[in-house]
Image: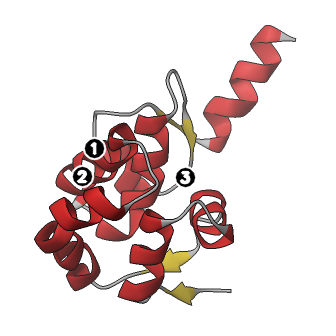
Amino acid sequence: MKLVLDTNVFISALLRNSTTRELLLKYSGFFAPRYVFEEYANYKETLQKKAVMPKEEFAAVEKAHSIMKDIDIRDTIIVACALAIPESVVWSDDKHLHQQEVVTVMSTSDVVKYFQDTV
């Protein structure tokens, strides 16, 4: 299923530790127009004051947005998750994620090789 993310859903996930946030962090098959992230940028100070989310997680979203905005903005949340989890690696065959150089991304063949070499 391909989900189109509404601004309200994204903002809700930022404001509360909820099922919405959990789903967004676990599921990568969503799409969002650029304006969702522009709205976030416009209201980030207000959101940070109201949110039940550590500032570090907000910083991860902001940094991920700046990394992915000219590559593929739909992958922002994936990069944000990787930034928020120390020493994490993204497993993806999405060429767009491989274009950025801030978080480590492994292809399926890389993951297979890693497990073959370590088991």
Q: Secondary structure beneath disc 1?
A: helix
Tell me the number on the disc at residue 62.
2
Amino acid identity at mark 2:
Glu
Query: Helix, strand, or loop for circle 2?
Result: helix
Comparing 114 with 1, the one in front is 1
Q: Which residue is mark 1?
A: 59
Q: Residue drawn 27% across and 43% down?
A: 59
Point out the image quarter for the N terminus. bottom right
| Quadrant for the C terminus in the image | top right
Badge 1: residue crowd in 10 Å (few <14, some 14–19, many ≥20): some
For label 3, the SS is loop
Q: Say left or right for 72 vs 111.
A: left
Image position of 51 (left or right of 29): left
Horizontal and vertical percent for residue 116? 81, 19
- Residue placed at 40% from the left, 48% from the top? 80
The residue type indicated by label 3 comes to Asp
Q: CA distance from mark 2 to mark 1?
A: 5 Å
For the residue carrying disc 3, how many other residues have a C-alpha within 10 Å: few (<14), some (14-19), or many (20+)? some
Taking the image as drawn, is residue 117 in sight? yes
Task: Name the disc covering residue 93, or none.
Answer: 3
Q: Is 48 situated above or below 89?
A: below
